[in-house]
């Protein structure tokens, strides 16, 4: 009976509620909690148990700018970005009760996304502030010049196989563009690294993925015959976009402090150096291109 009563009491206890830490509490704690995506080279990944990648190094720079130590929260991506923001920025996840990040990196800096509304007509992400674009990302095609002389347009993939990640934007794009004429030559892999390896093994002649991912894979391969295509992607809704970060809407003071650090890094070249350290192209986000 006592055991049953104890179990009943435990069931009735509420889950610990995740609390957003105000700016002063963050400074007092001595730690900045930053959410980054796991297994996402070259941006955030573990190597011999240590966090590495552009976003990990950037998170460390942000913490140091505030005189704080860094604590990384590794994010497993949900079905939608909305899920990730809810789970790690403003509400918390039932599997990690009480855990929230102070800031989350690699969030699209996009007005349409910020203004997106749910089925009730309410702002879907009114609980977060997305700010400080620090990089422009884009889709890219890499090809093996031993089997494909050039890629003047994606039309060549009517005749040459190309690898993509399963259920990704490149997958949906290549199987539907031009009335589906490229679908039969679109090969699916678990991820960009597997597709890239498929290209090296001769299973496909090219790969379409994020430019940063392909830069990183090309750096590891050190194969001068693997090249990046310069072509455009007709009917691809968003070929490039800016990447920023997100905090809870009540934490604008933290956003202001981090924004100052990001702007300094972009303007004095430290951001570009950070990307170059991983062999990546760096493209200014639109906010800074417009100033120029």
Image: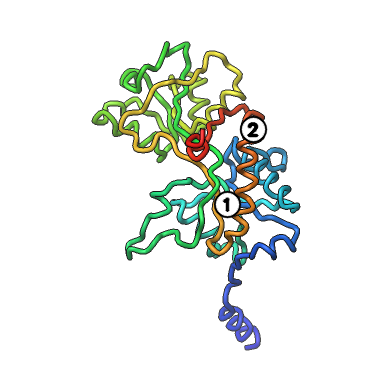
- Give the image location of residue 32, x and y in percent: 69, 55
Q: Residue at x 42, y 11 (%)?
A: 149
Residue 104, which numbered label?
1
Reply above or below: 102 against 8: above
Q: Give whichever of discs 2 and 1 has the lower sequence position.
A: 1
Q: Secondary structure at mark 1?
A: strand
Callout 1 crowding tier (Cα within 10 Å): few <14, some 14–19, many ≥20: many
Which quadrant of the figure has residue 154? top left
Which quadrant of the figure has residue 56? top right
Tell me how far mark 2 sits from mark 1, CA to CA: 23 Å
Q: Is residue 58 visible?
A: yes
Q: How many marks?
A: 2
The foreground one among 5 and 286 is 286
Callout 2 crowding tier (Cα within 10 Å): few <14, some 14–19, many ≥20: few
Q: Circle 2 sits on which residue? A: 269
The foreground one among 81 and 176 is 81
Reply above or below: 109 against 128: above
Horizontal side, residue 137 vs residue 6: left or right: left
Q: Secondary structure at mark 2?
A: loop
Q: Is residue 191 visible?
A: no
- Give the image location of residue 242, x and y in percent: 48, 40
Of the 4 image quadrants, the one containing the N terminus is bottom right
Q: Residue at x 36, y 58 (%)?
A: 117
In this view, the residue farthest toward the bottom is 1
- Give the image location of residue 247, x and y in percent: 56, 56
Reply above or below: 35 against 210: below
């Amino acid at each position: 009976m006592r055991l049953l009563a104890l179990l009943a009491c435990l069931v009735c206890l509420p889950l610990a509620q995740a609390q957003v830490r105000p700016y002063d509490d963050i400074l007092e704690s001595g730690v900045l909690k930053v959410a980054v995506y796991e297994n996402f080279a070259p941006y955030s990944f573990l190597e011999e148990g240590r966090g590495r990648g552009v976003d990990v190094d950037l998170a460390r720079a942000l913490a140091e700018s505030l005189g704080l130590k860094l604590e990384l929260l590794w994010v497993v991506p949900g079905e939608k970005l909305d899920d990730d923001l809810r789970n790690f920025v403003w509400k918390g996840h039932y599997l990690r009760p009480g855990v929230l990040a102070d800031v989350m990196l690699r969030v699209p800096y996009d007005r349409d996304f910020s203004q997106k509304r749910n089925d009730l007509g309410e702002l879907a992400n009114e609980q977060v502030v997305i700010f400080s674009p620090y990089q422009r990302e884009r889709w890219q095609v890499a090809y093996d010049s031993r089997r494909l002389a050039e890629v003047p347009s994606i039309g060549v993939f009517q005749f040459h196989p190309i690898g993509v990640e399963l259920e990704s934007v490149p997958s949906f794009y290549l199987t539907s563009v031009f009335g589906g004429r490229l679908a039969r030559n679109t090969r699916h892999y678990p991820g960009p690294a597997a597709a890239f390896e498929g290209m090296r093994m001769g299973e496909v002649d090219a790969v379409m993925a994020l430019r940063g991912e392909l830069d990183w894979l090309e750096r590891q391969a050190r194969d001068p015959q693997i090249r990046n295509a310069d072509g455009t992607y007709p009917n691809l809704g968003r070929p490039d976009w800016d990447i920023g970060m997100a905090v809870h809407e009540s934490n604008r003071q933290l956003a202001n402090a981090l924004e100052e650090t990001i702007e300094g890094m972009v303007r004095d070249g430290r951001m570009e150096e950070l990307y170059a350290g991983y062999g990546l192209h760096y493209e200014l986000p639109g906010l800074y291109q417009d100033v120029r």
